Image: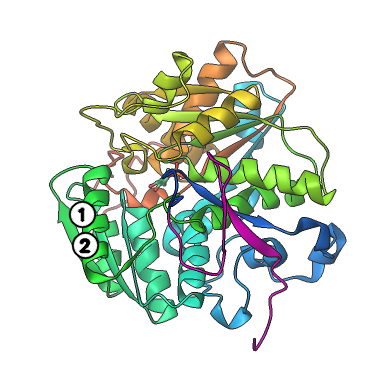
Amino acid sequence: MANPTGSTLSHLECTACGRTFDADALHRLCPECGKVLYPRYDLASVALRPSDLVSRTPSMWRYREVLPVRDAEHVVSLGEGFTPLLSAPRLSAALGIADVRIKDEAQNPTGSFKARGMSAAVSRARELGAKTVAAPSAGNAGGALAAYAARAGLAAGVVMPEDCPRINQVEAVVSGAGTWLVDGLIDDAGRLVRTTSEARGWFDVSTLKEPYRVEGKKTLGYELAEQLGWELPDVVIYPTGGGTGLVGMWKAFAEMTELGWIGEQRPRMVVVQAEGCAPIVRAHDQGERHAPRWEDATTEASGLRVPVAVGDYLVLDAVRDSGGTAVSVSEDEMREATRELAASEGIYPAPEGAATLAALRRLRDSGEVGDSERVVLFNTGAGQKYPDFMPAAPEVVPADSPAWNSGL
Ligand SMILES: Cc1ncc(COP(=O)(O)O)c(C=O)c1O
């Protein structure tokens, strides 16, 4: 190996039946029971200590010992991760909550947190010999896959719902991915990707249906701990479609405890979904471990228009084990929260990110989040990628206009 990363990846383990598999062969779901496979590491052999991180590159690859890529030559990076954890003092004061922070994932390459998962999955797919990678996407994942495949020199196929944000369609096309739109939802796109991949020998990197996107997303959890001085917040609010980021963080917390980097304390993990597509919220409220498909899913927060999640049991387990909860919010609440976050803190969020603030309002009103708590909201993408979500019609003034009543 030209340049070993020091990855301690040891094997893949099924999250449902517990069977183990060779990590150095291309795998998707558990070949025995069809559930999600997690990469496991020989954590006892990790020599890295938190204090060593200070001198490392500010990207998610700073945690390379607990990431799956073995040879640094295969790391496909555009500088993803190590996004700022921004304090939000005006928002905290307005909400009457001691410490509200925003993990601003809009600052990733391709403008969303999807960059993390795709960096890990494309790197590992290339390392294991894949030539073409493909995925269904609600929008942002398609743009990210196209960009990372281009960076890796691999071919890519992306299938998205035809009403996903136009910028996601454009970014996939411009980055050279074969791009198709389907008259349906992301699970319809997923079926097309699966059958086409089987027929053409593409490697299907649908989230949680291959083992490595979650590894990129888990770095959210490592960063949260590092940026808070190896403590975790009281509450994490996460906009949940497939839930990969949430279960990734949950996995990271367990790994860090085993590494001795943090203690046993965990944040309460809060799922937020849109009222028009809330399968995880419904299953949580009904005490179920699986979330049946949500029919007629509608929401302009395209990343939340995910009617069924392959990792539903992992999300629901994490929420319950953490003492967290699941809430759904309306489109109007997302709009209001978008305005509030942008105007009070200068952070223009994706609708999905805005949903986390709308959820926090509800939880504060119901007393489920107290005034002395530290809360982290995940802004998973850039508002700029959704130009039609927020109405804005600035006044046009003639170029030779004298001073006018600006209204400020
Ligand atoms: C901006 C944004 N936020 C949140 C999500 C949901 O992510 P996850 O599948 O990890 O729940 C998506 C997924 O497309 C997204 O694009």
Q: Quadrant of ligand 1?
A: top left
Q: Is residue 266 left or right of residue 118?
A: right
In what quadrant of the picture does the C terminus appear?
top left
- Secondary structure beneath label 2: helix
**Mark carried by residue 339:** none
Write the residue at 27% across / 75% down.
176
Kind of residue at badge 2? Thr
Q: Position of residue 91 (x, y in %)?
A: 60, 31
Examine the rendering and report whether any part of residue 400 can be seen.
no
Q: How many marks?
A: 2
Seen in the picture, residue 313 relative to 190 is either above or below; the reply is above
Residue 239 on the magenta span: no
Kind of residue at badge 1? Leu
Farthest top residue in view: 366
Q: Is residue 335 left or right of residue 44?
A: left
Q: Position of residue 307 (x, y in %)?
A: 30, 34
Write the residue at 40% across / 19% down.
282
Quarter of the view holding residue 210: bottom left
- Secondary structure beneath label 1: helix
Q: Main secondary structure of the magenta part?
A: loop
Examine the rendering and report whether any part of residue 374 can be seen.
yes
Seen in the picture, residue 261 relative to 371 is either above or below; the reply is below
In what quadrant of the picture does the N terminus appear?
bottom right
Residue wearing tag 2: 196
Residue wearing tag 1: 192
Magenta span: 1-28
Marks 2/1 in contact by CB < 8 Å: the verdict is: yes
Q: Position of residue 67 (x, y in %)?
A: 64, 63
Q: CA distance from mark 2 to mark 1?
A: 6 Å
